[in-house]
Each structure stands twice: as structure tokens, then as C-alpha cells.
Image: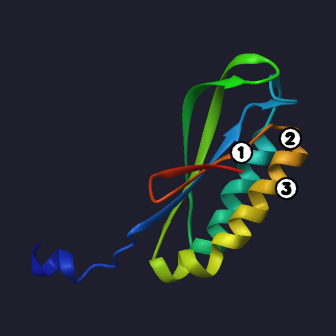
Amino acid sequence: MTKKLKSLIKLSCSVRILVPSTTDVNTPADTTKEVDDALEFLASRFGGATRSDAVGIWPSPEHGPVKEAVTIAESYCTSEELIRQIDSVIDYCIDMKFRMKQEAIALIVNNEMHFV
């Protein structure tokens, strides 16, 4: 590692919330507000957030295979910030799950996925 690189701020932890594009598990919906809210939530806790789009598929026990677009809201942070904020992130995902009537919300912390 170079001296210049060592002198930069290092954010070694990441938090990603996968925002579904559906409500009631598989009903397409305009989730623009949910995406914006997730970005603002993460930015307020970690100093910034980025979004990217993806497509996922997963087996719903009640609805069979569900393929949908998802928006990934992502923040990077220090390990201290992660420890301080992770419970509020989990609570946010729980609230999102109920607001959007989902079976689960995917939360990725340091490249490990958790279903909330």
C-alpha cells in the first residue's frame, strides 16, 4: 500500500438495503418514495449513500418464484459507525417490510446477506 493511499479515509464496512419494486410480495408498484427514503436514511447515518439497480429472483413460499427489479441503497462506513448504527438499520428494514407488505427485506452487511 502506498503512503498516499494510507493517508486517505478508509471506510471498510458496507451496508446495503435491497428495496423491492413490489408491494404485497409480487404486485408491481411505484417504489420511488421507498428508494428515496432508504437513501436519505442511510445518508443521515453514514454520511452518504449510493443507489444501483438490479434484478433478483427468489422462491416465495406462498407465491412461487418472484422475479423483480430491486434498487440497492448502499453506504460505506467505519466499523465504529456500523456498530453504532446497525440496530437502527435493522429497525428501518423491519418497518419497510411491513410498509411494503413483504415477506422479507434483504439487508447486506459487509457482504453477508440477512433476511429481515
Judge whether 95 appears above or below 41 on screen: above
Q: Amino acid at mark 1?
A: Ile
Judge whether 113 appears above or below 26 on screen: below
Give the spatial CA distance, label 1 vs label 2. Answer: 9 Å
Look at the image and tell me in which quarter the N terminus lies: bottom left
Q: Nearer the viewer, residue 80 or 58?
A: 58
Q: Position of residue 57 (x, y in %)?
A: 60, 23
Residues at discs 3 and 2 in contact (Cβ within 8 Å): no
Residue 86 occupies quadrant: bottom right
Which residue has dot 2 on it?
Answer: 100
* Residue plotted at (88% across, 47% down): 98
Neighbor class of circle 2 (other Cα within 10 Å; few <14, some 14-19, many 20+) is: many
Q: Is residue 64 left or right of residue 113?
A: right
Q: Amino acid at mark 2?
A: Met
Residues at discs 1 and 2 in contact (Cβ within 8 Å): yes
Q: Nearer the viewer, residue 60 or 57?
A: 60
Neighbor class of circle 3 (other Cα within 10 Å; few <14, some 14-19, many 20+) is: some
Give the spatial CA distance, label 3 vs label 2. Answer: 9 Å
Q: Position of residue 71 (x, y in %)?
A: 62, 39
Judge whether 68 appears above or below 36 on screen: above
Residue 95: assigned label:
3
Which residue has dot 1 on it?
Answer: 105
Which badge, 3 or 2, comes first in the chain's sequence? 3
* Residue plotted at (86% across, 41% down): 100
